[in-house]
C-alpha cells in the first residue's frame, strides 16, 4: 500500500530533497579536502588518527550547534561518522615508510585474513612483503634470506610449534614478531628460537576493520626494543594506539575478555539452536538491545569455528574463568529457583557499586549504539 501524502507534504519533501542534495555536495567537498590531508600526512608521517584535533573540532561544532538550536549530539554523531570515512579514505593514499633500509618482510601465515591485513598495511607503507604458508616450507631459506622483519600469524594451536621448528635460522638482526592473541608462550618460544630482536604483538581487532584508526595493538616486549621501535611508530602512523603490557597479565585478561566472553556467546547460540528459536520472529518482537545482543551472538556463527576454538582452547586458565562463571550462573539460578528476590536485588546493588562510574558511562555509550541499531531497521 502506498504511503498517504498531500500536495503540501510533497512540496515540503521537494525542498528537503534540495537540502539533502546540497549536503551531498558539501560531503564531496569535505572528502576532497580529507584526501588532501591524507597526502600531506603521508608525506610528513603524521598518524591518520588525531585525537586532539577531533576533540577540539567536536567541542567547537557542538557549541556552534547549540547556538543555532541544533542538538549538539546530532552534529557530533554526523562528524564521528564522517571521520570514520576519513580514516578509510586517508588510508588509500598510503603511509610514510618509517624504516627505509629494512630488507623485506616475511609474513608466516600471510594467506590468513590478519596476515593479509598486515601485508596490505605494510605494502601501503612501501615495504616489500613476502608470504610463507604451510605448503611453502621447502622454499623457506630463500624466502627468509635478507628479511628484516618476520611476522608470525598462524593459528594459535600451531604458533609455538612453527616458531620452534621453523624459525631458528633467521638472519641475526631480523626482528621476529607474532600477532597471536595470547602472548606468554609465543614470546618465550620466539626468544628461544631467535637470538635477535623479538616482540609480541596482539592486535585487538578482527581482520575486517577497514582501517586501524583508533584500534589498539598490545605490545609485549621481548628483546632489543630499540631495534623494533620503528615498527611501533609505523603502527601508530596507521592510526592504532600502542598499549604496552606484561605477557602474563595480558594473557590473564584475555581469559576473561576473550575466552570466557566468546564461550558464553557460543553457549547462548547453542541454546537458541536447541530451543529451535525462530530468529525472524524473535527479531520482530525484539527491542534494539535484544536485536544488538542477537547480532553479537549471530555474528560469532558467521565466522570461522576454528578461530574461536583456537581462542577458547588456547589457555588452560580459561577453563577456570569459564567454570567460575558457571558457578556464578548456578548461584544466580538458585536465587531464582528459591524465589529469593531480595538476594537478587542486593547482589545487583553490590555489582552496580563495584562498576562505579563505569556503569553510567556504559549506559551513555550503549544508548548511542542502541539508537543506531534502531536506525538500521528498514521496516
Ligand atoms: O585533521 C586531520 O588530521 C584529519 O585527518 C581529518 C579528520 C577529519 O575528518 O576531520 C580525520 C581524522 C582525524 O582523526 C582528525 C580529523
Image (cartoon, rainbow, N blue to C red):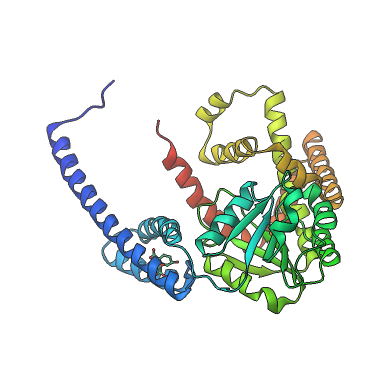
The answer to whether one can see residue 179 in this image is no
- Image quarter where ligand 1 lies: bottom left
**Relative depth, front residue between 379 and 122:** 122
Q: Residue 294, position in %: x, y?
A: 59, 36
The residue at the point 73 percent across, 50 percent down is 154
In the picture as drawn, the residue positioned furthest to the bottom comes out as 226
Q: Residue 100, position in %: x, y?
A: 56, 73
Indicate whether 148 appears above or below 117. Answer: below
Q: Quadrant of residue 196?
A: bottom right
**Relative depth, front residue between 193 and 85:** 193
Q: Residue 349, position in %: x, y?
A: 70, 54
Q: Residue 346, position in %: x, y?
A: 74, 51
**Relative depth, front residue between 151 and 201:** 151
Report the quarter where the N terminus lies. top left
The residue at the point 35 percent across, 71 percent down is 60
**Relative depth, front residue between 242 and 295:** 242
Amino acid at each position: 500500500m502506498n504511503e498517504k501524502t498531500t500536495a503540501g507534504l510533497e512540496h515540503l519533501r521537494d525542498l528537503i530533497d534540495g537540502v539533502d542534495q546540497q549536503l551531498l555536495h558539501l560531503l564531496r567537498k569535505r572528502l576532497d579536502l580529507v584526501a588532501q590531508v591524507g597526502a600531506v600526512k603521508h608525506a610528513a608521517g603524521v598518524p591518520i588518527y588525531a585525537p586532539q584535533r577531533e576533540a577540539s573540532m567536536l567541542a567547537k561544532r557542538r557549541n556552534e550547534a547549540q547556538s543555532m538550536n541544533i542538538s549538539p549530539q546530532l552534529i557530533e554523531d554526523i562528524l564521528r561518522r564522517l571521520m570514520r570515512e576519513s580514516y578509510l579514505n586517508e588510508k588509500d593514499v598510503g603511509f610514510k615508510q618509517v624504516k627505509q633500509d629494512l630488507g623485506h618482510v616475511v609474513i608466516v601465515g600471510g594467506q590468513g585474513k590478519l596476515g593479509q591485513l598486515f601485508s596490505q598495511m605494510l605494502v601501503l607503507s612501501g615495504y616489500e612483503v613476502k608470504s610463507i604458508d604451510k605448503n611453502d616450507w621447502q622454499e623457506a631459506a630463500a624466502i627468509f634470506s635478507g628479511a628484516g622483519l618476520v611476522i608470525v600469524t598462524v593459528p594459535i594451536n600451531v604458533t609455538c610449534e612453527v616458531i620452534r621448528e621453523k624459525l631458528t635460522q633467521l638472519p641475526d638482526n631480523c626482528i621476529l614478531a607474532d600477532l597471536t592473541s595470547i602472548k606468554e608462550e609465543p614470546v618465550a618460544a620466539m626468544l628461544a628460537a631467535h637470538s635477535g630482536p623479538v616482540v609480541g604483538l596482539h592486535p585487538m581487532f578482527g581482520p575486517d576493520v577497514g582501517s586501524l584508526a583508533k584500534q589498539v595493538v598490545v605490545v609485549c616486549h621481548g628483546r632489543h626494543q630499540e631495534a623494533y621501535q620503528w615498527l611501533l611508530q609505523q603502527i601508530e602512523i596507521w592510526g592504532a594506539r600502542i598499549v604496552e603490557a606484561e605477557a602474563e597479565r595480558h594473557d590473564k585478561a584475555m581469559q576473561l575478555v576473550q575466552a570466557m566472553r566468546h564461550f558464553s556467546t557460543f553457549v547462548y547460540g547453542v541454546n537458541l539452536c536447541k530451543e529451535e528459536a525462530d530468529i525472524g520472529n524473535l527479531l520482530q518482537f525484539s527491542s534494539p538491545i535484544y536485536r544488538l545482543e542477537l547480532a553479537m551472538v549471530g555474528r560469532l556463527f558467521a565466522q570461522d569455528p576454528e578461530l574461536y576454538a583456537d581462542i577458547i582452547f588456547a589457555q588452560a586458565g580459561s577453563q577456570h574463568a569459564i567454570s567460575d562463571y558457571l558457578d556464578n550462573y548456578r548461584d544466580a539460578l538458585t536465587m531464582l529457583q528459591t524465589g529469593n528476590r531480595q538476594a537478587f536485588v542486593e547482589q545487583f546493588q553490590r555489582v552496580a557499586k563495584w562498576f562505579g562510574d563505569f556503569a553510567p558511562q556504559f549506559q551513555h555509550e550503549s544508548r548511542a549504539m542502541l539508537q543506531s541499531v534502531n536506525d538500521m531497521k528498514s521496516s
